[in-house]
Image (cartoon, helix red, strand yellow):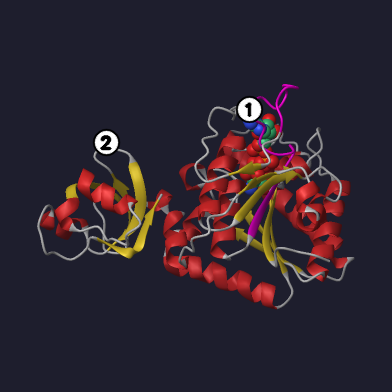
C-alpha cells in the first residue's frame, strides 16, 4: 500500500457526525472509525480532533426552561461529549484499538510549559498505540477563552505534533471557486502560497458548525506555511480518508501546498499564540523591510517606534508595521518598561530575538 504520510491529524466537523435532526449519525461515525482503523493498522499515526459534543448533547437533553447560549453549550457539551467518546470507544474496540480522550482549552496553549505538557501527553499515547481523540473542553471554555472553532484547535494540534498532514473533514467537497450552490462553481483542487481566497468564501456555515469556511481557509494557510499539507474534504463521502491517502490524485478535495522551508517547533508555537499577545511592538519601514527579507534578523530597539501595552519578559507580543498592519508575532526578550527605555537606540540587545519571532 503506497502512502505519503505516516503521521496525520484528522478533524471531523459537527456536520459530518450529526444528522439533520441533530442526533449522532452512528453509521457515519462507524464508517470513519473503520477507515481510521485501516490506516492505523497500516502504520499511520493518527490524532483525531472530533467536534460533535454540543450537537450530540442537544438531542439528548430537553431543558424545561429557556437557557442562554452559554448555559446551553455547557449543558449539551457535558452530556454530549460523554456520549461521543463512549461511541468512539466502543467502535474502536471492535478493531482492538485503544483510544484516549484529550479535552483542552485555548489557555492550555498559552504558556510553553502547558503546550509541552499536552505534546508529551499525545506523544506518549501515540507511542503506546493509543489514538488520541481531542476536543475543546466546552464545559469550561466560554466566550473569549474559546477557540474560534475546532478548525483552529486542529491546526494547533497538527503543528504541535509535527504531523505531515491535517485533513479537515466537513460536509462539502472542498473550497469552491464561487458559491457552493452555484452549478457554475467547482472545487479548487490545489492552493499555492499566496492565493487570496477571500472573494470566494461566503459567510454561510453549515447548520451545526461554528467557524465556517473562512476560519478553515485561514487556518489551512497558516498550517501549510509551517510545512504541513492541509486537505479539506467531504467526510460524508464513503472511504474518503483511505482514498485521500492512497489515491490522492483521483480523490476530490482542496489541498494546500505546504511550504518547503522548515519552521522550528518554538516558532510554530509562537505562530499560533497570537491570541495571547500582551502588547504590541511598532516598527519602522526599514525594520519591516529587513524582517520581510530572507535574512534572519531580530527586532532591535533602533527599528522600534512605539510600544503598546504592558508585558513581561517571555510574554507574546504582536509586531506591527508603520501602516498599523500586524506582520508577525514574537516572544519578548525584556519587559515593556525596558523596551520603552531603549526605543530608537543603537547597540542595544534585541527586544524580540530571531529564534522567537514568527513573521507571517
Ligand atoms: N467557497 C466555499 N466553498 C465551500 N464551502 C463554503 C464556501 N463558502 C462558504 N462555505 C460554507 O462553509 C461550510 C463548511 O464550514 P462549517 O460550517 O464550519 O463546517 P464544519 O462543521 O465541518 O466545521 C460549507 O457547508 C459551506 O456552506
Ligand atoms: N467543541 C464543539 C465543536 C464546535 C465546532 O467547532 O464545530 P465545527 O465547526 O463543526 O468543527 C463540539 O464538540 O460541539
Magenta region, main secondary structure: loop
SS at mark 2?
Answer: loop
Is residue 26 rendered to the left or right of residue 308? Answer: right
The label number, if any, that marks residue 63 in the structure image: none
Q: Write the residue at 74% across / 38% down.
A: 173
Locate the N terminus and report the quarter of the image it occupies: bottom right
Above or below residue 200? Residue 173 is below
The question of residue 169 being in magenta is answered with yes
Badge 2 or badge 1: first in the primary sequence: 1
Q: Residues within 10 Å of mark 1 (few under 14, many from 20)?
A: few
Q: Is residue 147 visible?
A: no
Taking 185 as reference, is 298 above or below it? below
Q: How far apart are marks 2 and 1 (CA)?
A: 31 Å
Res 216 visible? yes
Residue 96 is left or right of residue 226, and the answer is right
Q: In front: 310, or 305?
A: 305
Helix, strand or loop at mark 1? loop
| Magenta range | 165-186
Q: Residue 323 carries which label?
A: 2
> What residue does disc 1 label?
204
Q: Which residue is drawn at 27% across and 36% down?
A: 323
- Is 326 situated left or right of 77 in this image? left
Amino acid at each position: 500500500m503506497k502512502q505519503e504520510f505516516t503521521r496525520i491529524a484528522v478533524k471531523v466537523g459537527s456536520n459530518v457526525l450529526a444528522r439533520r435532526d441533530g442526533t449522532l449519525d452512528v453509521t457515519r461515525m462507524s464508517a470513519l472509525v473503520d477507515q481510521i482503523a485501516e490506516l492505523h493498522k497500516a502504520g499511520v499515526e493518527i490524532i483525531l480532533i472530533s467536534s460533535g459534543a454540543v450537537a450530540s448533547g442537544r438531542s439528548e437533553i430537553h431543558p424545561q426552561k429557556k437557557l442562554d447560549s452559554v448555559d446551553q453549550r455547557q449543558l449539551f457539551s457535558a452530556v454530549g461529549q460523554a456520549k461521543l467518546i463512549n461511541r468512539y470507544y466502543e467502535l474502536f474496540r471492535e478493531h482492538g484499538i485503544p483510544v484516549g480522550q484529550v479535552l483542552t482549552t485555548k489557555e492550555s496553549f498559552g504558556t510553553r510549559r502547558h503546550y509541552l505538557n499536552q505534546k508529551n501527553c499525545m506523544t506518549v499515547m501515540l507511542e503506546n498505540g493509543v489514538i488520541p481523540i481531542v476536543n475543546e473542553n466546552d464545559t469550561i471554555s466560554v466566550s473569549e477563552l474559546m477557540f474560534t472553532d475546532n478548525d483552529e484547535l486542529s491546526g494547533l494540534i497538527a503543528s504541535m505534533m509535527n504531523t505531515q498532514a491535517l485533513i479537515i473533514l466537513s460536509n462539502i467537497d472542498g473550497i469552491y471557486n464561487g458559491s457552493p450552490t452555484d452549478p457554475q462553481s467547482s472545487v479548487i483542487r490545489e492552493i499555492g502560497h499566496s492565493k487570496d481566497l477571500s472573494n470566494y468564501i461566503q459567510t454561510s456555515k453549515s447548520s451545526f458548525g461554528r467557524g465556517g469556511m473562512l476560519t478553515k481557509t485561514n487556518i489551512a494557510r497558516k498550517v501549510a506555511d509551517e510545512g504541513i499539507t492541509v486537505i479539506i474534504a467531504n467526510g460524508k463521502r464513503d472511504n474518503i480518508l483511505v482514498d485521500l491517502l492512497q489515491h490522492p490524485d483521483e480523490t476530490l478535495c482542496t489541498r494546500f501546498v505546504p511550504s518547503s522551508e522548515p519552521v522550528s517547533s518554538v516558532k510554530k508555537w509562537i505562530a499560533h499564540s497570537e491570541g495571547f499577545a500582551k502588547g504590541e511592538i511598532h516598527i519602522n519601514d526599514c525594520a519591516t523591510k529587513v524582517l520581510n527579507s530572507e535574512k534572519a534578523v531580530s527586532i532591535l530597539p533602533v527599528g522600534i517606534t512605539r510600544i503598546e501595552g504592558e508585558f513581561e519578559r517571555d510574554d507574546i507580543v504582536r509586531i506591527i508595521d508603520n501602516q498599523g498592519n500586524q506582520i508577525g508575532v514574537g516572544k519578548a526578550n525584556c519587559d515593556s518598561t525596558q523596551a520603552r527605555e531603549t526605543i530608537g537606540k543603537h547597540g542595544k540587545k534585541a527586544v524580540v530575538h530571531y529564534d522567537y519571532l514568527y513573521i507571517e
